[in-house]
Amino acid sequence: MRVIILYVSLLVIASGCSSSKRAGKTDMLKDAPEWVQQTPNTPSYYHGIGMIYKSGVQNYRERARQVALSELAGNISVNISSSSVLNQFEYDHTYSEFFKDEIRMNTQEQLEGFEFVEQWENDQQYWVYYRLSKSTWEEIKKERRDKALRLSKAQLEQANSYTAKGNYVDALNFYICAIEEIRDFLGEDLRISFDNEERSYATSLKTAIINDLQRLKIVFPSSAMEIGPDSKNKNLSFEAAIIDNCERPVSGIPIITRFTWLPGYKIETTSDINGKFKIAIGTIDFRKQSEKIISEINLDKIVSDNTNDILVKRLFETMKPHSYILPIKLTAPAFDIVLNEKNIGQTIINSGLREEIVRLLKQNGFELVSANNKGDYSIIVEANTQKGSERNGLFSAKLSAAVLVKDRSNKTVYNRKVEDISGLGSGFVEAGRDAFRSFISKYRISIYPEIVQNLF
């Protein structure tokens, strides 16, 4: 019974507290004008109301003003026309939201034409009300849009003049400037007059940029390249060129080159006065029969070098320059094998090492030739076992070996010494054979991968 009475009492107290809060709020705003109680709903205006608590706040009037103008700017809708520059550049939803947020922030910074309506305050709060005529805002925006469009068209005309001269670097710079001028109106249907006919400015601008990029092409010295494993092809490099559709060399264009055999690696170069740029191949893995070299215009760098505007940068991210591919045909290297194996001082014909070396080489697609024919590389192994100790009828032996790889010019390209590989058996010969088996395992697991890594 006491529990029930206590529960009812708590409900009454809570209800009383809630009623007191509502009453307190009602009392605080009892003399407030209607716009404080509820934001006006006048279709011909944008409204912004700001409130700041006075306690401990300096410049509360100015802060309330900023809150009101922020709300006013936030009420100005941002729409994206189907004929806008954004749609021409095929933006995605993420970029659309990013664009809208950017324009809202810029609208707040450049807001004008608004009017002060009224202010109201009590002991604790300060309220201020601003509004902006929608027709006034449309006039202001139209004036800004027309000015931006004029400036952008002038930049576009400059770009076209540089294109005609074959100066594509400056042309691309002016295209970027043309977009910067209209960055606040990228979502709108911008129109220009051409030969007494209205045209979409977005279409004209994007077409001009795309056409210039398509005029540029990367030319390799041949349609394909064959590379063999001989040493003269190590660190191989060659020159490619970038030209336009009139076969004119184009200088100052940044290029990115990637290699299919080196994921994540790239070379960044710039075409010289003759339109040429260098591609260094470096060491290549010959375990495949073919690879590719892929070069393309580094549009990201061009944009980054000419603007700091994130909105413009992200717009150009939707444009992907054409990639130019140079097929690489690889000639697999040939190996010969030279073994000198001794077990307890006696030459042995076959320890199983030759079969393992042959198996691993074939597994990677390498060619095999006899020692008499001399391959591109020679694998040379000197291995010998020595007697160890004998205990309780069990004998031990120790194997030491030297593994060398030499190229066709007899230059050593790999050298490794192996010491103290142990073997056990019923006699020293058997123990030596056991040591050779352990050595073969070591060759398979660590030595052969090192050789491949070293060479390719």
Image: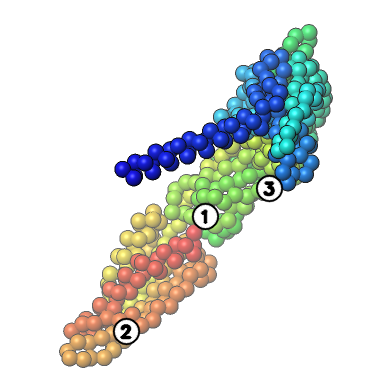
User: In the structure shown, which secondary structural element does the residue marked by tag 3 occupy?
Assistant: strand
Q: Is residue 209 visible?
A: no
How packed is label 1: few (under 14 Cα within 10 Å), some, or many (20 or more)? Answer: many
Amino acid found under the numbered disc labelled 2: Lys
Cα distance between the residues tagged 1 and 2: 38 Å
Please report contact status of discs 1 and 2: CB closer than 8 Å, yes or no. Answer: no
Q: Nearer the viewer, residue 120 or 378?
A: 120
- The nearer-to-camera label among 3 and 1 is 3
Give percent across and percent down for residue 105. Answer: 70, 33
Q: Residue drawn at (78%, 8%), measured in percent from left and top?
A: 196
Query: Position of 263 compared to 121: left or right?
Result: left
Name above or below for residue 143 compared with residue 316.
Answer: above
The disc at residue 269 is 3
User: In the structure shown, which secondary structural element does the residue marked by tag 1 occupy?
Assistant: loop
Among the 4 quarters of the image, the one containing residue 395: bottom left
How packed is label 2: few (under 14 Cα within 10 Å), some, or many (20 or more)? Answer: many
Which of pointers 1 and 2 lies earlier in the amino acid sequence? 1
Number of numbered discs visible in the structure rendering: 3
Q: Nearer the viewer, residue 86 or 155?
A: 86
Amino acid found under the numbered disc labelled 3: Thr
User: In the structure shown, which secondary structural element does the residue marked by tag 2 occupy?
Assistant: strand
**Residue that carries the numbered disc 2 in the rendered image:** 398
Amino acid found under the numbered disc labelled 1: Ile
- The nearer-to-camera label among 3 and 2 is 3
Cα distance between the residues tagged 3 and 1: 20 Å
